[in-house]
Each structure stands twice: as C-alpha cells, then as structure tokens.
Image (cartoon, grey):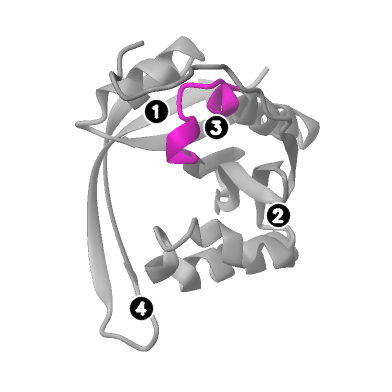
C-alpha cells in the first residue's frame, strides 16, 4: 500500500444512469458548493433545455450527478452545429470512465437529433482534457476566446475570461 496509514485497499464500482436534467437536480449541480456562485447559469441552462434550445445530460449515481455534459443547440443552430459545455466529472471520480460514457451519450443524443458536427472549448493549459478529447476523435480547429459574467446571491457581477482551444468532431 502506498499510504503507510492505510488499513485496506479495495475497488468499488458504481452504477450510473445517464438522463436529462430534472428541475429537482439543480441544487445538486452546485456540487456541494463548488459551483454555487454559478447558480444563475445553471438555472438559465435548465430553462434553455425547457425551451428545447439545450440538453443537460447528467450521469446520476445514488441520486447525485457524478457527470455532466450540457449541449447548446441554439448557439450555432443555423450552421447545424451543437456546442458542448460544462463537460465535467465529479472530481473524486475522474479517470473512472464516467467522462467517456457521458461523451458517448452526448454524441448519441446529437445523432438522434440529426446534428452532424459538434464543438467544444478546452482551456489551453488543460493538457489532460485535450488528450481525453483527442482520444475520442475531437480535433483542435482554432483558438477560442470567451467571456461570460454571472451574479451570485445579488453580488456584483463576476466576469470570467476563457482562453481556449476550439475543438470539433463530425457526428456520424
């Protein structure tokens, strides 16, 4: 064992159900405070799903969202391109295969809707994410600069700047 204080090591498996986000899931999407400041963004994304402009796919285990892929259908609708964002796996479970299953489910949902191309942004310094997406067939197509703002509990607007690579994949 690597940890001298460890008493036992074992592997555990969890069952994950991939499904669209429900309104009752919204508080859990804050991931125990990690994304509480983005509560309004989460609500706006859910409202877009309700309008048919988005799909928030969740990987749920024991009632808790352990993986997410949000799909924006409106952003590049005229071009027939869907944009994936908020692609994440709950931190303690990263590397367990949840992300791959979530991406497979997202691509299946895109095929069902007749979407022929998908895009997503990856922060330029996130080499592990770049490798992950490249293994899944995504390719860097250029730089992407994004800026968004949000308010948290009536506070002053926070502005985030993202320096990313735009990645794309044909959906066949």
Residue 124, percent from left and from top: 22, 32
Q: Residue at x 72, y 66 (%)?
A: 24
- What segment carries the magenta color? 89-100
Q: How far apart, in angstroms, are the residues tagged by discs 3 and 4?
A: 29 Å
Q: Which mark is residue 120?
A: none
Q: Which residue is mark 1?
A: 167
Q: How far apart, in angstroms, are the residues tagged by discs 4 and 2?
A: 22 Å
Q: How far apart, in angstroms, are the residues tagged by discs 2 and 1?
A: 25 Å
Q: Label 1, secondary structure: give it.
A: strand
Q: Which mark is residue 118?
A: 3
- Between 7 and 13, which is closer to the camera in this rendering? 7
Q: Label 2, secondary structure: give it.
A: loop
Precedes in sequence: disc 1 or disc 3: 3
Q: For this view, does 125 lie left or right of residue 2?
A: left
Precedes in sequence: disc 3 or disc 4: 3
Look at the image and say whether residue 19 sits in the magenta stretch. Answer: no
Residue 121, percent from left and from top: 37, 38
Q: Residue at x 62, y 65 (%)?
A: 26
Say if residue 78 shows up in the picture.
yes
Q: Which residue is mark 4?
A: 151
Precedes in sequence: disc 4 or disc 2: 2
Which image quarter is the C terminus in? top right
Precedes in sequence: disc 1 or disc 4: 4
Q: Which mark is residue 21?
A: 2
Q: Marks 2 and 1: which is nearer the front?
A: 2
Q: Quadrant of residue 170?
A: top right
Precedes in sequence: disc 2 or disc 1: 2
Q: In the image, is residue 37 above or below residue 76?
A: below
């Amino acid at each position: 064992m690597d940890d001298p204080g460890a008493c036992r090591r074992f592997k555990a498996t969890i069952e994950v159900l991939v499904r669209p986000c429900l309104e009752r899931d919204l508080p859990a999407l804050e991931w125990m405070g990690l994304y509480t400041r983005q509560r309004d963004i989460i609500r706006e994304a859910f409202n877009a799903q309700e309008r048919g402009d988005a799909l928030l796919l969740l990987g749920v285990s024991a009632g808790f969202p352990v993986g997410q892929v949000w799909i924006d259908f409106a952003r590049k609708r005229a071009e027939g391109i869907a944009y994936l964002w908020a692609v994440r796996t709950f931190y303690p479970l990263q590397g367990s295969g949840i992300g791959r299953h979530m991406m497979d489910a997202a691509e299946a949902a895109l095929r069902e809707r007749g979407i022929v191309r998908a895009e997503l942004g990856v922060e330029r310094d996130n080499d592990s994410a770049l490798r992950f997406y490249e293994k899944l067939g995504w390719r860097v197509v250029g730089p992407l600069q994004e800026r968004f703002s949000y308010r948290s509990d009536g506070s002053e607007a926070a502005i985030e700047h993202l320096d990313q690579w735009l990645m794309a994949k044909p959906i066949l």
